Image: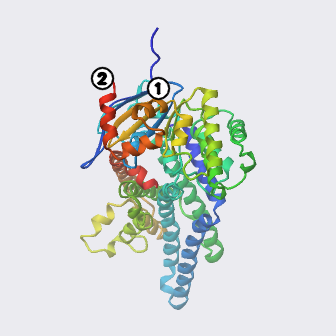
């Protein structure tokens, strides 16, 4: 891994975002809209029926946490798509850039974007709903790293599919996170699912984060197992995604798809 | 006295996509400081060959040695000494010219990047565009900026894919002269594809004609015109592209071995 080259790739994204106000708008507008609509909706529900009061904490926490995963996945995939859209992809692939360096740069972008969104949403939640994310226990912060890892993995998988199937797979960039959202127990507990769906939900690292968040907000601490399992699952999925990416890249090199997707 | 090792050495290169043969059996060698033109009709295999040389495409069989190293196993170290420019590949249009060049300077780990960028922009007479967004440049200006990018790492091997396509004759002439000047200054090896025979006649020391995935003719532009008894490379091109008599004539006249 050459950090000079990774910094070159990152510099490109920084220039790109600073030159394109709509990209910044995309980064800030949708998360804030989510938070405002669902936050005010919950406040209204609290006013008409006080029983749902804890739901405010669950929902706002869930929306902020979900955006960690979503933004990480988006940053990885859209960074790749930016090169396709600007017909610059071949310039990057004929430069002495290793795949690991290319992926590392998109991961760093995913981390930065996730952090920007979390800070922005946390401040909004503090001022609009007096919901202080900083008061949550550190263990929950550690657990939430799993959302970043899963976002990276999904981003790498999506990019691999776009490399293999080209422009027709572009829509996956926005669809993939929402494939797992309904079964990640983001807004409701795993116990809501029918019994056959629960093991599938529990195979996702994200489920442990949202279940853990609700548990912590109820006042129960997290156990070590609840923290270790999602990290182990993430390690497994990231390894598998790496294999898939490598396989798709080799197929693309064999079939000449890199030039096709880049033009 | 030993012959210097070729910069590019390709042996029995073959590329088959599903049922379609893009390169049948191509062998070639390019020496240091040579400008070699790669000519052929659309679908002749030029782009396939260039993409294999850049490592974008895996050959079905055959070997590619660049700087004496096997491309498949030393891709990164080879690419550090190569660069590429194509009329069909663009730099991100939202970035300013100097920003794009700075990014590629970092990717190629260029020392004194800002000085290098200034020097290249001066050489290609586009210094005044350094703060312009790349997407707002004219075709001629974009081509010159693309060439600045292609020379950012002082490559030993430069691959140019139709660099003068879509340029007017005046700008195309300027670009040709700039390429020639830079090549002479640095004794660079250039592999050049073009459909503009004027480019090839003016620039190339040697020409390879590709037809249906095979090299069907090879020599200096003048040698090829003489051999095919044609007044211009364009006429040779048309005859080879149409595949008929001239190709057969060529086969008979080529010395064996």
Q: Residue at x 55, y 79 (%)?
A: A39
Q: Specify whether B143 is left or right of A245.
A: right
The chain to which mark 1 is attached is B
| Label 1: few (<14), some (14–19) or many (≥20) C-alpha neighbours in 10 Å | some
Task: Kindly indicate whether the residue at mark 2 contacts the one at mark 1 (C-beta within 8 angstroms).
Answer: no
Q: Nearer the viewer, mark 1 or mark 2?
A: 2
Dot 1: element = loop
Query: Which residue reaches farthest right?
Result: B128
Tell which of A183 and B48 is nearer to you. Answer: B48
- The correct choice, above or below, for A153 with respect to A189 in the image is above
Q: Specify whether B208 is left or right of B11.
A: right
Q: Which residue is mark 1?
A: B7
Tell which of A174 and A147 is nearer to you. Answer: A174
Determine if marks 1 and 2 fall on one subunit: yes
**Nearest to N terminus: mark 1 or mark 2:** 1
- The correct choice, above or below, for B215 with respect to A180 in the image is above
Q: Which residue is mark 2?
A: B256
Dot 2: element = loop
The chain to which mark 2 is attached is B
């Amino acid at each position: 891994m050459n950090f000079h080259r990774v910094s070159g790739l990152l510099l490109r994204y920084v220039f790109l975002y600073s030159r394109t106000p709509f990209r910044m708008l995309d980064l800030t507008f949708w998360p804030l809209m989510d938070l405002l609509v669902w936050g005010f909706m919950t406040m209204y529900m609290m006013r008409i029926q006080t029983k749902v009061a804890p739901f405010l904490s669950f929902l706002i926490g869930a929306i902020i946490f979900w955006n960690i995963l979503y933004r990480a996945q988006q940053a990885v995939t859209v960074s790749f798509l930016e090169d396709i859209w600007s017909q610059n992809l071949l310039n990057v692939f004929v430069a002495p850039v290793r795949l690991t360096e290319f992926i590392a740069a998109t991961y760093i972008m995913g981390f930065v974007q996730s952090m920007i969104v979390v800070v922005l949403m946390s401040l909004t939640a503090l001022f609009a709903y007096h919901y202080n994310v900083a008061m949550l226990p550190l263990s929950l912060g550690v657990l939430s790293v799993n959302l970043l890892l899963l976002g990276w993995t999904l981003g790498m998988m999506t990019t691999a599919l776009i490399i293999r199937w080209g422009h027709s797979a572009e829509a996956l960039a926005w669809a993939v996170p929402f494939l797992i959202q309904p079964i990640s127990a983001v807004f409701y507990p795993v116990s809501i699912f029918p019994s056959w769906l629960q093991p599938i939900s529990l195979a996702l690292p994200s489920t442990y984060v949202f279940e853990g968040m609700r548990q912590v907000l109820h006042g129960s601490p997290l156990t070590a197992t609840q923290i270790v399992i999602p990290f182990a699952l993430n390690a497994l999925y990231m390894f598998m995604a790496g294999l898939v990416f490598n396989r798709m890249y080799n197929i693309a090199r064999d079939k000449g798809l890199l030039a096709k997707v880049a033009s | 006295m030993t012959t210097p090792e070729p910069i590019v050495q390709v042996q029995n290169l073959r590329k088959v996509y599903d049922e379609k043969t893009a390169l049948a059996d191509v062998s070639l060698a390019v020496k240091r400081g040579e400008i070699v033109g790669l000519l052929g009709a659309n679908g002749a295999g030029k782009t396939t060959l260039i993409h294999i040389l850049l490592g974008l495409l895996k050959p079905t069989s055959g070997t590619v040695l660049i700087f004496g190293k096997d491309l498949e196993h030393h891709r990164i170290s080879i690419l550090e000494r190569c660069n590429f420019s194509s009329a069909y590949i663009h730099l991100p249009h939202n970035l300013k010219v100097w920003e794009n060049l700075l990014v590629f300077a970092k990717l190629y780990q260029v020392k004194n990047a800002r000085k290098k960028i200034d020097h290249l922009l001066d050489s290609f007479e586009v210094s005044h565009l350094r703060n312009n967004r790349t997407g707002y440049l004219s075709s001629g200006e974009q081509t010159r900026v693309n060439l600045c990018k292609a020379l950012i790492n002082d490559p030993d091997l430069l691959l140019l894919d139709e660099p003068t396509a879509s340029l007017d004759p005046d700008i195309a002439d300027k670009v040709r002269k700039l390429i020639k000047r830079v090549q002479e200054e640095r004794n660079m090896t250039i592999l050049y594809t073009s459909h503009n025979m004027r480019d090839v006649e003016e620039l190339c020391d040697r020409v390879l004609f590709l037809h249906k995935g095979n090299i069907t003719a090879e020599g200096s532009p003048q040698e090829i015109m003489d051999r095919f008894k044609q007044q211009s490379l364009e006429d040779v091109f048309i005859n080879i592209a149409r595949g008929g008599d001239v190709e057969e004539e060529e086969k008979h006249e080529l010395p064996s071995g």
